[in-house]
Amino acid sequence: MQRLRRTLAEAGRTVVFDGVGWTTPKLSSFLESVMERVPVWICTRSEHPWDIGHFWPLLVRLERLELPPFRPAETRELVAAAVNSGLIPRAALNLADPMHHRSRGSPWVLHAWLEQIARRAYDLSDPRVLHRLDLDRRMHDLFAPKSADR
């Protein structure tokens, strides 16, 4: 841990911790020590103590940015960017509006669905494809390995 802290401090660049969930006292202490050395961005899906654990008291030292749900045009742009980069099939363009409606514009849900489309073969012309994507996403979340810090 000391070498990592030293390396981060020497680099002098902003450090991003993405997907921060429940934190133990030890992990919170590590995050705090990094915050003392370099600028830090922390991405989390919640600001509630019961969701992020011991890191909660440190939030007063950070500015809060909230990512609101995507608007329909932004969802279409996200899907088009994934298609244009070759990550997902062109047929996914037809799903942009239904994806937006079903996800309520949630960037997290949209990202998970696009990841699944990129990894597995789905019949994108099937009217139930979004139901299957959402079911697969929820099953993945349910059975994903838990963090060692929990």
Image (cartoon, grey):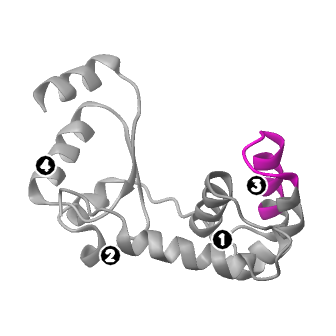
* Tag 4 residue: 29
Q: Position of residue 11 (x, y in %)?
A: 34, 18
Which callout, 4 or 2, points at the residue further toward the start of the chain? 4
Q: Residue at x 64, y 73 (%)?
A: 133
Q: Mark 3 vs mark 1: which is more N-terminal?
A: 1
Q: Is residue 23 above or below residue 86?
A: below
Q: Which residue type carries mark 2? A: His
Q: Residue furthest top?
A: 10
The stretch in magenta equals 75-90
> Counting other residues with Cα less than 10 Å from the Cα at mark 4, is it few (<14), some (14-19), or many (20 or more)?
some
Q: Say which amino acid is labelled 4.
A: Ser
Which residue lies under the disc numbered 3?
78
Q: CA distance from mark 4 to mark 1?
A: 32 Å
Label 2 vs 1, first from the N-terminus: 2
- Distance CA(mark 2)–CA(mark 3): 29 Å
Q: Residues within 10 Å of mark 2 (few under 14, many from 20)?
A: few
Q: Disc 1 marks which amino acid?
A: Pro
Residue sitting at 54 percent across and 71 percent down?
A: 137
Residue 17 covered by magenta stretch: no
Q: Quadrant of residue 15?
A: top left
Q: Residue drawn 55% across and 73% down?
A: 136
Are discs 2 and 3 less than 8 Å apart at CB?
no
Q: Which mark is residue 69?
A: 1
| Residue that badge 2 annotates | 48
Chain-order first, disc 4 or disc 3? 4
Please name the amino acid that badge 3 sits on.
Leu
Of marks 2 and 3, the one in the foreground: 3
Vertical order, 15 against 17 (above or below): above
Q: Is residue 148 left or right of residue 12?
A: left
Q: Quadrant of the N terminus?
A: top left
